[in-house]
Amino acid sequence: MSGVRIPSLRRSVYARRTAVVAGLGALVGTLVLNGPAAQAAPPSPPDAATARAYLAELTVKPEGTMDGYSRAKFPHWITQSGECNTREVVLKRDGDNVQQNAKCAAVSGTWRSPYDGATWKDAQDVDIDHLVPLAQAWRSGASSWTTAQRQAFANDLTRPQLIAVTDRVNQAKGDKDPAQWMPPLASYRCTYAQMWVDVKHYYKLTVDSAEKNALTGILNGCH
C-alpha cells in the first residue's frame, strides 16, 4: 500500500510546485509587461493651460548682472549611479538603441534633436542642453542660491531641464531666453515654451518683460 501512496504524494507535491512556478512566471510576466515604459525624451511639461497659469505666477523683473557668475558654481555633471554621470544618463534616455561601455560612455546609438529635427549617430555631435541656461538662471535668481541648489538645478532629471540636442544648435542658443531664441523647428516651440515655464516656475526664477511677452505669445497659440 505504501508503494501506491508515495508516488501519489510525490505527484501531489510536484503538481503544487508546478502551479507555484507557473504562478510566479505569470506574475513576473505581468510585472515586465506592465512596468514603466522606456522614456526617450525629457519629462513631459505641463499642458499649455497650466503653463499659461504658471507664467502668470512668475515674478516679472529685469535680469540681474553676470557679476560673480561661473559655470563652476553649477557643478555638473555629477555621478548619478555607478560609473554614470548626468550627461550619460540623458544620452541613454534621449537616444534610441544606445550602447554604453564599462565606463557608461555612449559608444553607439541614434539621437534625434527636437530643436532642429536632425538625427545623429555619434554622441560627440550631441550636447546636453540646460533648457534654462545656467547663466540665464544666474541672472534670474540663482545668484543667491547655495552651491548645492545650483548643483541640483544643473543636474535635474526630474523636470524638463536637460535635453539631448544638436551641438551647434545648442551653441547658437547660448544663454538666450525665448525672447531672443527659439528652436528652429517651429513644431517644437510650444513644447519648449511649456518646458521653460515649468522649470522657471518650479525654481521660482524671474522673467523679464520681453521674455514674458514672448512666452505669452507662444503659449496663446498652443493647445
Image: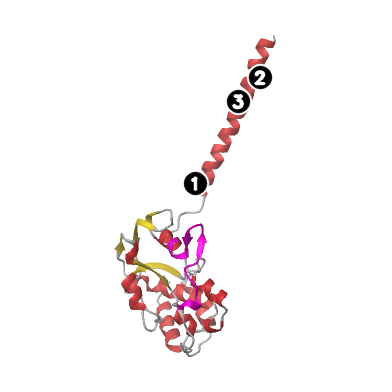
- The tag on residue 15 is 3
Task: State whether residue 216 is above or below residue 20.
Answer: below
Q: Earlier in the sequence, mark 2 or mark 1?
A: 2
Magenta part of the chain: 71-88
How many numbered marks does the figure carry? 3
Picture coordinates of residue 50, whole percent (x, y)? 51, 73
How far apart are the two marked residues, 3 and 1, measured between alpha carbons?
27 Å
How far apart are the two marked residues, 2 and 1, measured between alpha carbons?
36 Å
Picture coordinates of residue 10, whole percent (x, y)? 63, 20
Q: From where the camera sits, is residue 210 visible?
A: yes
Is 75 included in the stretch rendered in magenta? yes
Picture coordinates of residue 9, whole percent (x, y)? 66, 19
Which residue is located at x 32 percent, y 73 percent? 169
The reply to whether discs 3 and 1 touch (Cβ–Cβ < 8 Å) is: no
Q: Quadrant of residue 17?
A: top right
Q: Nearer the viewer, residue 194 or 95?
A: 95
Crowding at mark 1 (Cα within 10 Å: few <14, some 14-19, many 20+): few
On screen, residue 174 versus residue 79, left or right, reads left
**Image quarter of the C terminus:** bottom left
Which residue is located at x 56 percent, y 80 percent? 145
